[in-house]
Amino acid sequence: MNTIIEIHNKNLPIFCPNKDMILWSSHPRIFLFIDKNGYAKCPYCNTKYKLNSNKKG
């Protein structure tokens, strides 16, 4: 899966699979760390998460 999911501060902490994924039980739930560039990647399904630090979100 090459999905990039945009997240906001209100969505923290990040975990995968997230509640909106259809296959919520596809792998164990893990919490992800955001790197200095604002990205996190799940080692199981390769879903990428991008932190939108925009104050609106």
Image: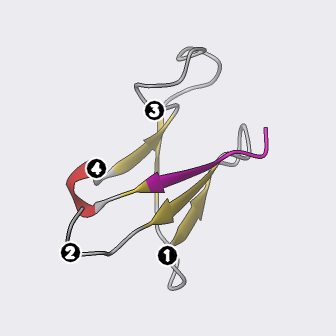
The answer for how far apart the CA atoms under marks 3 and 4 are is 10 Å
Q: Is residue 8 magenta?
A: no
Residue under pointer 2 = 55
Residue under pointer 1 = 38
First of labels 2, 4 by sequence position: 4
The answer for how far apart the CA atoms under marks 1 and 3 are is 18 Å
First of labels 2, 3 by sequence position: 3
Tag 1 and tag 3, C-beta contact below 8 Å? no
Indicate the position of residue 14 as horizontal and vertical percent values.
Answer: 39, 50
Tag 1 and tag 2, C-beta contact below 8 Å? no
Q: Amino acid at mark 3?
A: Asn
SS for dot 2: loop
SS for dot 4: helix
Residue under pointer 3 = 18
Residue under pointer 4 = 11
Residue at the limit of the structure toward the front, as seen here: 56
Q: Residue at x 78, y 46 (%)?
A: 2
SS for dot 3: loop
Q: Amino acid at mark 4?
A: Asn
Q: Nearer the viewer, mark 2 or mark 4?
A: 2
The answer for how far apart the CA atoms under marks 1 and 4 are is 14 Å
SS for dot 1: loop
Q: Residue at x 20, y 75 (%)?
A: 55
Q: Amino acid at mark 1?
A: Gly
